[in-house]
Each structure stands twice: as structure tokens, then as C-alpha cells.
Image: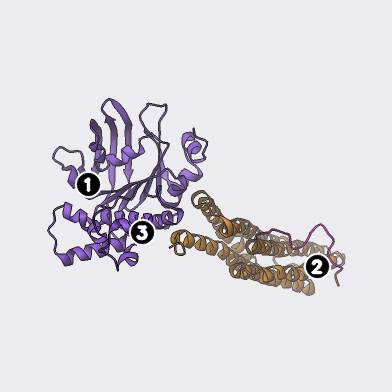
Chain colours: A purple, B orange
Amino acid sequence: MTTATPAATEAKRVEVTDLDIYYGSFHAVKSVTMTVQPNKVTAIIGSSGCGKSTFLRSLNRMHELIEGARVEGSVILDGQDIYASDVDPVNVRRQVGMVFQSPNPFPTMSIADNVAAGLRLNSRKAKKEELDEVVERSLRGANLWEEVKDRLDRPGMGLSGGQQQRLCIARAIAVEPEVLLMDEPCSALDPVATLAIEDLIGDLKENYTIVIVTHNMQQAARASDLTAFFNIRESGDPGELVELDRTDKIFSNPENKATEDYVSGRFG
Amino acid sequence: MAHGSRTQYREELAGLETRTLEGLDLVVTQIDRVVEAAQQQDIELAEWVISDDDRIDGRYLEVHQHILSMLALQAPVAGDLRVIAALLHTIKHIERMGDQCVNVAKLLPLAGHEPPRHPELLAKLIQMGRLARAEVIQSKQAFVMRDATLAEDLVLQDREINRLNREIFRDAVDIGDEPDVREWAMTVTMMARAFERIGDNAVDIGEQVAFVVSGLFREFSDSSTPPPAAG
């Protein structure tokens, strides 16, 4: 049972309707309709190749970096279809941030510059005091400030894996997105760093809408409010959304037999 | 970093324990009411006890569902797992204690609004109710404080309830030939049996406390062996 706490900031919901995703002639994800709830953590689970990462990337048009990628259907963020012809994908990615599987701080930059990088890339002219404030606020938001405040000018690569991932989360929230996407954010981390990130995810949902793709079912169980199970019928078929429900329902009494088999480990 | 991690889970587990053990407070309230109802032959108060059992049943369902969620979502291990297993047993005992209060409340009107009552027998029944109440409170304290010694002491407290239960049975057998009095005395033996069961449930909760503390489950007393010779 999740305790309902009032959101500190009302984040934005994402309405996905009849979304099909293709890479050239390959149909990767078929006809997904779902609502990503604001100020909640939605986990996406499913076996490899079920389209969950592709679906996640489609929520900020990151999958378009692969040639031949196209979508049908709509993804509405705050009343705006992010695939409308007049929408700039760079602006979408500012509103919908992404944290990747392996921590990827910019190798030549200091801790502070890593956090401020997004602001600079978004070409906002900011004064130093303003940047300092954003750096501190973002590092605090990522539960990293206390650990790095005395070495902000040191390289980001000098941090531990878990700290680097929290640095990447700080970098993602520095530009004040509406939605945070996380693609297996803990798969390269040890259990202690993993729990720290999961705690952080719990804190972040007060201000953001979060979608997390994870192979780790226990992580989905621990860290999310809602869980979406993706599956493919046969090898080569497109991935489909099988079931989306409250996480406690998915893990104690799912509606669909395929979901039950997957969460019970009887799959494949 | 590890020390302060999983804060939300820890708070949730602590909250689950609190909600479960608060069920014992609900039982204490029900015992208080049903003891007063027995003392005053207050049928209205007895009916209140019957209807208010829904609160304990509701708490049982709430805790049961919460425990299932915790097991499914958090995969608790070691001490946390023992606590959750103990809470699942404890909430069942609480639900049974609530039912025993209802049993007493349902027996009260059977002998009529003004039954011919035997003061000495009634006093023993009331004393059993008070002892059962004390055991319920002690079981909660032992759980909250993780005090295995206090938990095992419940066995000693329970002996007095068991002794009174046997006494009430003998008294009822010897109470005379007056049909109305005999009928009332029969209901008293059944009420005594209900209080005696509440005591047993409190001891069972004590066994769960010892399990939480030590990791080993054992019954405090073997109910298949005869009780010690009572005075």
C-alpha cells in the first residue's frame, strides 16, 4: 500500500494513444494506449526485446536517433502532441529528461559543469550566481550535495558509480523537466548504490512524473506505484502492453496469465 | 549510505506494526465493555460490543492486505521477515479475541434481562475478564519492546485465568437445582471459556514475540500435557 502524500509540485501526465513504433520495416511496438500518471513512478517490465526501452525512448523522441525510426499514434504531454510537426524534439527532450543505464557524466567536465551542462546546451544565458544556485539545488535534489559540495570543481568521472548516476540525475533535473525517464538506471550499480537511487526515485516523484524501465522485478516492486508489463507473442512480433495496474496488484494478483507467469519467474 | 536507506520501506514496516498492535487496543476496549456489560447485565452495551467487532474485522482485513503487499513488493528478509510473519499471526489472534468478546456479548441476553445471579460466581468471571485484559496489554508491551522475558511471563499470568476457569466450571456444576440459576451458570461457564481463550491468544502472541527476538519458534507450554495441580 502506498501512502498518499500531496505532491510538492504537480507534474505532468503523459497520454499515449495507439502508439506504434517502427524501425524501417520492423514493427517494434504495437498499439500502446496508456496514461502515465503525474507524480507517480511507473515501472515498465518485460523480457528482452519486448519493446520496453523503445517505448520509453519514444516518450522523448530519443528513439529517432536510430535511422528509419517512425511512430504512428500520439503522445500528448501537457496538452501538446510531442510528435506534432511544429514541435522541436530538442524542446521535447528538455521537458522529458532521460537517465541511462550506465552513468555517463561528461568526462572532461567538473561535477558542477556536468550539472550545468544542460542549461548551457539549452542556450539559456545564466549568471554565475544563478548557475551556482541551480547546481546546488539539482545536487540536493539528487541526494548528492552533501557528498560533493567541497569538490564541485573536481572531475565528475572521479565519483563512484552510484554517485555518477546521481550526478546524471542532477544533470537531468537541472533543466527542470516535467517527466524523467530512466532506462535501467541501476543495472551497473551495486546493491547499496541501487537502494540509494531507489530512495531518490521515491523523493523525486514529489516533483516529477517518472517512468523507469527495469529488468529487475524486485526493483519495480519496491520503487514504483504503477507497473506496465510489455510482452511479445512470438519472436519477431512487435511488443505489446499486456497489463498496466497498481504495482501491488501486478505483484499480488495480476489480471493476465502472462503477467503472472512473468512476475513469478515462470517465463521463458 | 546504507544505514539510512530504504527509509520509506522502514517507515511502512513500522507503520504496519503500529496498525497491527493497535488492534490489541481495540480488543482492550471491547473487553472493558463486555466486562462492564457482564457486571451490569447491560444488554445494550453488549449489543454495542457485537456491532463494534466490525472495526476489529476491518483492521484484520487491512493488515492482511498490507502484509501481502509488503511480501509481494519488498521481499523482506531476516528480522523484517520474522516481524511480518509474526504480525500475520498476531492480527489473526486479535481477530479471534474480538470474536471471543462477541461470544460473551451474545451469551449475556440468553439468561434474560434480570437473571438470578450468583455474586461469587459473577465476581470470578469479572476477575477473569480483568486478567485477560491485563494479558492483552502485556502481550502488546512485549511486542513493542521486543521483550521475550515479558512475553514468556504471560504463561504465568495465564495460569490464574485457567485456574478461575476450572473453578467456575466446578461452581456451576455445584450451583444447585434451581433451573434458572443453572441456566445462568451455564452461560457463565461459556463466558469464562471465552475469556480463557483470550488469555491463550495473548500467550500465542507472546510466542510470536519470542520468535521475532530469537528466530526460533517454540510453544511456551504444551497444551497436550495436563495442567499443574491447581489449588
Q: Position of residue A257 (x, y in %)?
A: 49, 34
Query: In front: A88, or A139?
Result: A139
Q: Is residue B124 above or below residue A216?
A: below
User: Relative to B181, is A148 on the left or the right?
Assistant: left
Circle 2 sits on which residue? B168
Circle 1 sits on which residue? A93
Residue in the image at 55% along x and 62% along y = B17
Q: Is residue A259 magenta?
A: no
Residue in the image at 18% along x and 55% along y = A119
Q: Nearer the viewer, mark 3 or mark 2?
A: 3
- Give the mark nearest the N terminus, 1 or 3: 1
- Where does the N terminus of chain B fall, quadrant-wise? bottom left
Which stretch is magenta? B215-229
Chain of the residue that carries numbered disc 2 in the rendered image: B
- Where does the C terminus of chain B fall, quadrant-wise? bottom right
- For the residue carrying disc 1, how many other residues have a C-alpha within 10 Å: few (<14), some (14-19), or many (20+)? many
